[in-house]
Image (spheres, rainbow, N blue to C red):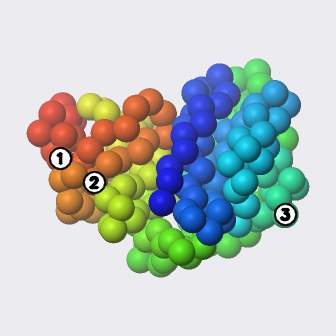
Amino acid sequence: MQIHRLVFSPFEVNTYIISDKSKECVIIDPACYNKQEQEYLIKFLKENDLKPVKLLNTHCHLDHVFGNKFVSDTFNLKAEAHKDEDFNISNALNSASIYGLDMDEPYPIYKYLNEGEIIKFGFSELKILHVPGHSAGSLVFYNEQNKFAIVGDVLFNNSIGRTDLPGGDYDTLISQIKTKLFNLQDDTTAYPGHGIATTIGKEKKTNPFLV
């Protein structure tokens, strides 16, 4: 499997393209904000001969769904996320206006994803972990064989996701990280929604919020 990271929007969101030898791929948190970023996404997929077959959201805060409508319309894909993200995706346009930003209103979540389910594409699988606290429906997409997890805004390099937005809860986030993410192997790479990747083992030892 290959993990490609594209950084989009004023919020510098990590959009992940995960692919394998089949050339099928999933797009996670499409954050392409303007036409230039949208064109870059298309160019990247064409240059790598990739076929998007899934649109996944770790959660649906506005910055992580900037490109949802574009991806849905361009590749005929429908968003898949946790049901508890209905509130965030339905309020994305209003949230954007608060920041003085324009965006295409994303479509509602089409398919709800639940803890323990397996997402299949090409020759690959991603296991779903529900890790609330940053938002009520925050999901992590985990592959044990390749030892990686797409963690969204749950966990960062030496930090954690903010918990002051609707659906966030600090105690829940800390508990969920320790009981779910910290049960993964220490050498599992955690790919966050912003910033650089880290490992589960490193965060166990050095993250000031969790040691």
Would residue 80 be found to the left or right of residue 2 on screen?
right
Q: Is residue 56 visible?
A: no
Task: Give whichever of discs 1 and 2 has the lower sequence position.
Answer: 2
**Residue at screen point 65% across, 31% down:** 8
Label 2: few (<14), some (14–19) or many (≥20) C-alpha neighbours in 10 Å:
many
Q: Identify the secondary structure beneath mark 2.
A: loop
Residue under label 1, please give it. 201
152 lies above or below 54: above
As shown in the figure, which amino acid type bears the numbered disc 1? Gly
The disc placed on residue 177 is none
As shown in the figure, which amino acid type bears the numbered disc 2? Thr
As shown in the figure, which amino acid type bears the numbered disc 3? Asn
Rendering coords of residue 80 (x, y %): 65, 65
Residue under label 3, please give it. 76
How many numbered discs, if any? 3
Label 3: few (<14), some (14–19) or many (≥20) C-alpha neighbours in 10 Å:
few
